[in-house]
Each structure stands twice: as C-alpha cells, then as structure tokens.
Amino acid sequence: MRQAMIFAAGLGTRLKPLTDTMPKAMVPVGGIPLIERVLLNLKTAGFDRVVINVHHFAEQILCFLQANHNFGMDIHISYERETLLETGGGIKYARQLFDGNSPFLIHNVDILSNIDLKDFYERGHDCDALLLVSERKTKRYLLFAEDMKLVGWMNVETGEVKSPFEDIKNMSVEVLKSQYRYFAFSGIHVFSPSLFPLMENYPDRFGIIDFYLNECHQANIKGWVKEDLRLMDVGKLDTLQEAEKFIINQL
C-alpha cells in the first residue's frame, strides 16, 4: 500500500486576505485549488490512501472533496478541531488513520514541484525518515553527514545551531559549513511508523523538524537531493502569479 498525508490545516496567514475567507488548501493556482493539484499528483503516482489534516475553514475542504467524490481516492480526514497541532503533532494525532505496516509520504499542500513522488516514496523505505532537500538559498539549513544522515540544523543569519550531538551544537556556522553538507528542506518527506514510539512522550503540539533533530542520534533520518529539482512554495500572495508560470512550464 502506498499512503500519504497532506498538511492542509494551516491558517495561511501569509496568503491573507485570500485566507480570510478560504483555507490555504483551496487557494487556486491556474484555476485549480492547491489541494486538488497535490491529490492528483499522488493519484498519478499510485498512492492508495491519503490522510488530510484540516482545521482552518475545514468544512470548505470537506465539501470540496465530497463534491468531487474524493477524486476516486481513499481519503481520511484528521480534523484538528480545537487547535492546530503543528506538523509533528498533526502526524501523531493522525496515527490511527494509517496502515502501520508501511511508511507514508508527507506533502505540504502549498508545495509545487517536479519530484517523482513514487520514486521518492520507494527511496524512503530504507530509513526511518527521508527528507527531500535542495541547495535553495535560505537562512535555515539542515545539516547532514557525508552519508546524508541528519545531524543538525543551523540559522546562518543568527548563528543558532540545533543538534543532539554536543560537538556539532558548539560549532560556529563557518565551521559547520566546512565540515558538513547543508541543504534547505522542501516540505516533502517520507515517514516510517517505526518513529511513532519515539513520539509517545512528546506533547500534543510540536514541529516535525524539531522531532527529527531531537531524534536523529538514535533514528536513521536521512536527506535526499534531487539534482534537477524544481520546487516552489506557494505561501505568499506575491508568489501566486509566479506559481501559475511554474505550472505552465511543468506541462
């Protein structure tokens, strides 16, 4: 079974005023809502079950899925009614909706890319988690050893470093750049159910990247770089027009 989770619960504050009346997942790009684009990409890649977490204007998403007969897919809803649980908490809360025998691909609803989701999902079977990363310029980078095992995180602007390894945590950004590989996270990753026991002592709300960073010393969490990756985060109003051009170029 190929299974996936779409993060669609966020408030979409960077897309205001659009998200004052609709969830981010329903914001159209090229006339098609973001969630429909992700779902159809997953369907094309042969995914059988999809879990979608919802919160902000959740009923709009539920009605849209119902009107489209779930696009012929086996869709399960994880409704975070009371409060947003963040990315890690959202995964933990949805645990019972997954087949516990196989990993699942996690995809932010506002990410457009040229990634082969089937190929990436299959690569994720060899570790506890596989993170799609790129050389995109940013302030925050994930740190990897030569074998692409996750070892930490750094903010090149503030100098902040996170790692369960004391020697790495005490290094400067300049030294880290010279000794480790560093890449930007894409918002697409594969998660193995083997990680759920490590989440048991975590609170209801926590970020998945913080979880990966806390546990990378005892879990096999790796990164994967797609050399010709084209990826766009449709998280801001000024990126919507650019996103339409991105879609056209992908066709």
Image: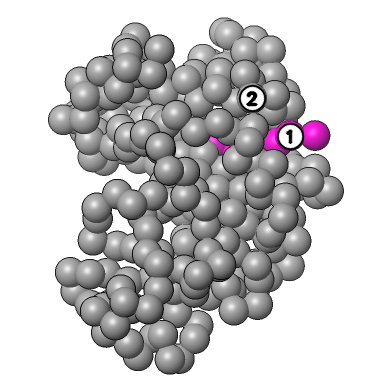
Q: Nearer the viewer, residue 84 or 207?
A: 207
Please name which of the two marks, 1 or 2, marks the residue nearer to the observer: 2
The kind of residue tagged 1 is: Arg
Q: Which residue occupies 50% across, 83% down?
A: 164
Quarter of the image where the C terminus is located:
top left
Image: 146 above or below 39? below
Q: Which residue occupies 66% across, 71% down?
A: 219
Image position, residue 28 (x, y; %): 34, 17
Span of residues in magenta: 1-7
Near mark 2 (Cα within 10 A), the count class, few <14, some 14-19 or many ≥20, is: some
Q: Is residue 82 visible?
A: no
SS at badge 1: loop
Q: Nearer the viewer, residue 223 or 69?
A: 223
Image position, residue 179 (x, y; %): 37, 78
Left or right: 46 as drawn, with respect to 224: right
Name the mark on residue 2: 1
Quarter of the image where the N terminus is located:
top right
Image position, residue 106 (x, y; %): 57, 43
Q: Which residue is mark 2?
A: 45
Left or right: 67 as drawn, with respect to 8: right
Residue at the right extreme of this rendering: 101
Whether the magenta-drawn stretch holds residue 2 is answered as yes
Contact (Cβ within 8 Å) of mark 1 with mark 2:
yes
Q: Nearer the viewer, residue 96 or 152?
A: 152
Q: Is residue 114 visible?
A: yes
Image: 130 above or below 45? below
